[in-house]
Amino acid sequence: MVSDPGRLRHRFVLEAASDLDDGAGGVVRTFTPAGALWADMTPLGLATRFSDGALESRATHHLRLRNGPAVSLDHRLRLGGDRLFRILAHRSAEPGYRLILVEEIQP
């Protein structure tokens, strides 16, 4: 099935991680823009889990995008300046496209 390019209406900024020495024996992770991607975004629902004794719910989504900059689990995606997504998995789809499973995270 060939995707309709007109459905790729969400512009994401791909951000690459860099670990910097914090001067106290640890690291500070920063992210810098590494490219732009246009994607079709489909919400899948909420992932619920316990973290630090509290129940957390996070939205998960499937993204379908054209092949472009290389994507890895060390990247994250930004949508509209304030929405961040952690990449959970990615794979090739039909020729020229890629599928990415993401989880929305709080900045």
Image: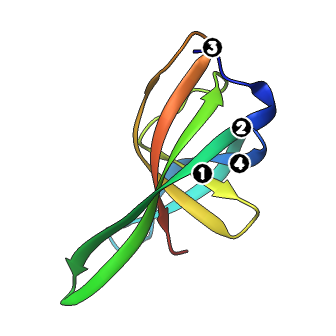
Depth check, front residue: 36 or 74? 36
* Residue hosting label 1: 77
C-alpha gap between disc 2 and disc 1? 9 Å
Looking at the rendered structure, the kind of residue marked 3 is: Gly
Q: Are marks 1 and 4 in contact (CB under 8 Å)?
A: yes
* Residue hosting label 2: 37
The answer to which of marks 3 and 4 sits earlier in the sequence is: 4
> Quadrant of residue 27 in the image?
bottom left
C-alpha gap between disc 3 and disc 1? 20 Å
Q: Residue at x 66, y 40 (%)?
A: 40
Mark 1, residues whose alpha carbon is within 10 Å: few (<14), some, or many (≥20)?
A: many
Q: Is residue 47 visible?
A: yes
Q: Is residue 10 left or right of residue 93?
A: right
Looking at the rendered structure, the kind of residue marked 2 is: Leu
Q: Is residue 15 visible?
A: no
Element under disc 2: strand
Which residue ends up furthest to the bottom in the rendered image? 53
C-alpha gap between disc 2 and disc 3? 13 Å
Which residue ends up furthest to the top in the rendered image? 95
